[in-house]
Amino acid sequence: MSDKTNPDEPLPQSVSENIGTISEFYARHEDHVTATQRVVEKVALFLGSPGYVAANIIFIVCWIAGNVLAPDFDWEQIDEPPFFWLQGIIGLNAFIISTTVLIRQNRMSRLADHHAHLDLQVNLLTEEKTSKIIEMLEAMRRELPGAQAQHDVEAEELAKPADPKAVLEAIEEEEDEPYGEAGKRASQQ
């Protein structure tokens, strides 16, 4: 028996449907992006590229070399050391880069929030289905001859669906506890 799969074999229908659903999700998300947002994101992608970093380094080295060597070639110095104009250009460059990256990250963060919400919904649905399947299997097991006397506490526990609100409250209590203690100590001082 071979572990290799045939690349010419079509994907199962459920996989194709899932890929289509994901593609539609991204297409809908892209439909809501404004023209300005697209431009800003293209600029952010360019500003984050290795080529842009290399171009910046080359520009800075040339600027410094040109201004330091200008008197030797009887050229006019544009920016004398300590290179105030260069510092201004670098500061403006940093502002533009950080702003465009933050704009792009905000949109990516919203997309990640949608993914997290979808994951949560799917996980909750899966938990419900799993509990129902365990409950049905336990019912079938009890119907089998000779199995009625057996009692499976773990299966009974797993068959109970989890209460998402109670789980969330328990998580919040556990995660907030250190902050609550720190807040109490700070207020007592």
Image: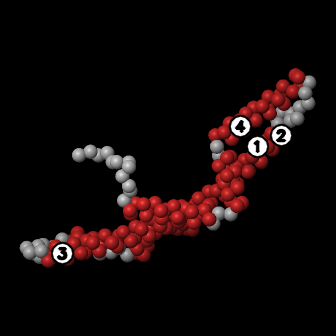
Q: Nearer the viewer, residue 176 or 166?
A: 166
The alpha-carbon separation of the residues under discs 2 and 4 comes to 20 Å
For the point 91% across and 30% down, the residue is 76
- Badge 4 local density, few (<14 within 10 Å), some, or many (20+)? few
Q: Earlier in the sequence, mark 1 or mark 3?
A: 1
Q: Earlier in the sequence, mark 2 or mark 4?
A: 4
Q: Nearer the viewer, mark 1 or mark 3?
A: 3
The alpha-carbon separation of the residues under discs 2 and 3 comes to 81 Å
Q: What is the three-letter code of the residue carrying label 1?
A: Ile
Which type of secondary structure does the marked residue at label 4 adopt?
Answer: helix
> For mark 2, what is the residue?
84
For the point 43% across and 73% down, the residue is 169
The alpha-carbon separation of the residues under discs 4 and 1 comes to 13 Å
Q: Nearer the viewer, mark 4 or mark 1?
A: 4
- Compared across the picture, whether 49 is left or right of 127 comes to right
Residue 11, image quadrant: bottom left
- Whether pointer 1 and pointer 2 mark residues with C-beta atoms closer than 8 Å, the reply is no
Give the label on residue 90, or none.
Answer: 1
Q: Residue furthest left?
A: 146
Give the label on residue 140, or none.
Answer: 3
Would residue 157 be visible to someone looking at this image? no
For the point 47% across and 67% down, the residue is 118
- Badge 1 local density, few (<14 within 10 Å), some, or many (20+)? some
